[in-house]
Image: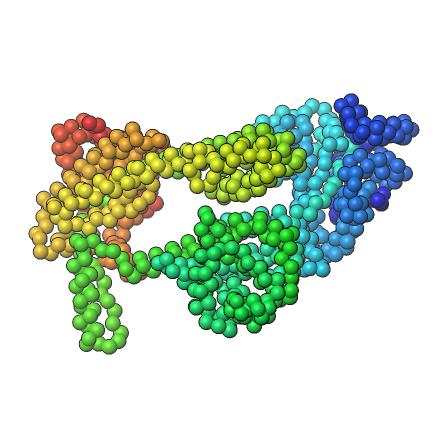
Amino acid sequence: MTSDTFYINPALSKVTPVEYELSFEPFIRYLKERIKTEKTIKLKLYEFILDTFEAYTANVAECIDTDNVKTHQQLLELMFAALSPAIVNEQEYLWALGTPVPNKVFYSTDAFRDFAITDLASKTKTSAATDAELLKQQHLDYIYRLILKRLYNFTSALNNDIYYTRLNAGTGLYRYYKIHADTTFIDIEVKGSLPELTFEHIEPYLHNEAGAEALMEVLPLSLFKFKGFAVITLNDVTARHAIDEIRDVIISHNTNDDHLYEQVIQLLKTLTEDPAIEFGLMPLLKLNGTAVYDAGMCTNSILMQAAQQYGDVQSVFKDMAERYELHPKAVYYPVITPGRIARHPYLGLLKQAGVCSYARIPLLYHRHLAGMLEVYAYQGIEYTENLLSKVDFALPLLAQMVQNSIERFNVRIDQVIKENFTSLQPSVLWKFNEAAWNYIRQEREHSSGLKIETVAFKEVYPLYGAIDIRNSTMERNTAMQMDLHNSLTSLLTVINRLDAYIEEKELSRLIETCNQWIAKIEVSVTASDKIRIDSFLNQDVPNVLLTVKRQHTDAAQLVDEFLATANITCEGPVYAHQHQLETSIRLINTSINKYFEREQQQLESIYPCYFEKFRTDGVEYDIYAGQAIAPGQPFSQDILSAIRLWQLTSMVAITRLTQKLQQQMPVKLQTTQLVFIHSSAIDINFRNDERRFDVEGVYNIRYEVIKKRIDKVRLKDSNERLTQPDKIALVYLTRAEADEYKGYIGRLQQQQMLTPGIEELELEELQDVKGLKALRVSVRYE
């Protein structure tokens, strides 16, 4: 132990954000309280320490100068005995006593002093200045969060943990430490009246929307004085940090797979703390049920690299994948010997590549083989239990990562199919047949430079409609918040019932994490938050609970009941709200699609049309009708009127349908109905690059612009949305369009399909769109 004083960051030696004094009084008070309740042998120790302190402090001022604190060596030694584990090795334990704002250390273990001094000596001026600025901000956070907890009872505000990164010169790998400041022995004095604070004052700060400076105006630090001392400990959290980083990298992945795999492999090295160990990752890609090798996605496998250089990579991959899928178990070869090569020829390729030790571990996603993790070295290594247990924690995350790669592969296959093999409706297939035939005929006459002609339809009439689920985004967020809240509160209940079986430190961590997430989701929750909470509930928590189950058989039933409900598939009871919402949305969309499948036959009986649906939270559709689509059948204004009447009638039927569906919905959802009236004919052509029909020409493009911008349009000089449940909104540009549709509306009102009356509305100006108006009518339910 050493009573040498030093600064954790000398650059802040003269920075004092808040007034403070070093005092042993909080510690003495703490001893008195413990003596009242202590029943074990520790009572003798506490009484001895208290007697010694009272004897010393009777002749010493309450507040102590840190530069003279070494004169109280016996007191410091007793404090260490009381505040540290009894059998701790001082040469390895990173522990210290510091000022109430923990930068100046006045007593520490030799290990802590060496760690701090060595690290400070290795820093460049630039990095020291950067660290000083960061530490200054951390000090402000520490001070304000302690004030908020002690004086305002914001219990979730205090987090005294700081994470610190250090490069291990011996291994070349980074290690990560958690610096914890215990504030038990710090008192806060208030000079004058304590300002009143509301949650609105501190909400931006607690949610990291603003820095500590945001509190300085309402809560100046000149009002406070800290007295006492901080107990500082450093814990090596390299393994946990590496797992968290792997999770974060996978969640935030927005680059190519190669970069992602490189990051994860480097973190796996950090996790094992051994630079001699290398890792390979390979997803198991399948096409039509058969394993396929993709050079772009399998290059991170050392086996595939060796097969690429020394063998037939395709046959090696197929043979390995097929065999491994039948028996997906971990295999370990500490040394690649001739006998093993004879039994497993692929090991010969690895030997040629210089690999001496090799292991292959299956990555299972929802109990199906998604890929494999390779652990290898260019020298002989032992696959010890310690090494494998470290890797084991990362396996669920690695399985998710390779599954993501498989899904990206499948999406790419789908994209290529859509890019080159678009399914065509019979009403327009004849035009593509003509284009293909013309291409074939020209190909026989010209050997090169051919381009297939553009498929276009001139002067067709567009009809656009949209059925949208009202407030679907808000409903999704609400359901997710409710389910996550239920999951976390359920977990808290289980933890409290198991508190006798869980280690106190682990128990506190789980409770703190639950409370932090509950507080977060009560305000808002993002998709990233949900992934992190699911990871906590489905990976972190089960690791603890399964350990409890193994060690305490009387707790097994409670553990099993909780794990059976808290699953990420949205099938368990704690995910009921999201499951119910998705059931309701699926019911609406399926019913609307089935309706259109039936009614499209009636539409085609009026006149051949091109009908294209788009799946959103609801259904959107485009209809194109005109002489160009069916040259052999006369087209007239009467036919167009019949199609438009069909569209309006179908909107009434869909409104009635979705309203009736509410009786079957676990979550009662409503739909809104929108029609865009465009009386002029437009030109459309088939875009080869996107494999879909699009409008052609500047004037026609305006139709698409308006169509895309009216879905959430509001009434002029109002916050009211045009689209409303139980109603059909019809947007138009000209009076003639409105008059035509009033005729259709009148017919449906006479048939008791719409209620009497028509709302005639002016709409707000949209970007590059002015003068829009609308009719709005109410549907009469049967």
Residue at the image point whose x is 59% and y is 67% from the top: 336
Q: Quadrant of residue 685?
A: bottom left
Q: Quadrant of the N terminus?
A: top right
At which x and y percent is residue 756? 18, 26
The count of marks equals 0
Residue at the image point whose x is 71% and y is 29% from the top: 223
Colour mode?
Answer: rainbow
Q: Is residue 677 above or below residue 387?
A: above
Asked if residue 439 lies left or right of residue 663, the reply is left
Residue at the image point whose x is 19% and y is 51% from the top: 610
Q: Is residue 50 above or below residue 473?
A: above
At which x and y percent is residue 191? 73, 26
Q: Is residue 261 visible?
A: no
Residue placed most toward the observer, 185 or 361: 361
Residue placed most toward the observer, 595 or 269: 269
Asked if residue 399 lies left or right of residue 637, the reply is right
Q: Is residue 568 visible?
A: yes
Residue at the image point whose x is 72% and y is 60% from the top: 170
Q: Quadrant of the C terminus?
A: top left
At which x and y percent is residue 382? 65, 59
At which x and y percent is residue 233? 73, 42
Name the residue at the right extreme.
Answer: 59
Residue placed most toward the observer, 552 or 180: 552
Residue placed most toward the observer, 568 or 327: 327
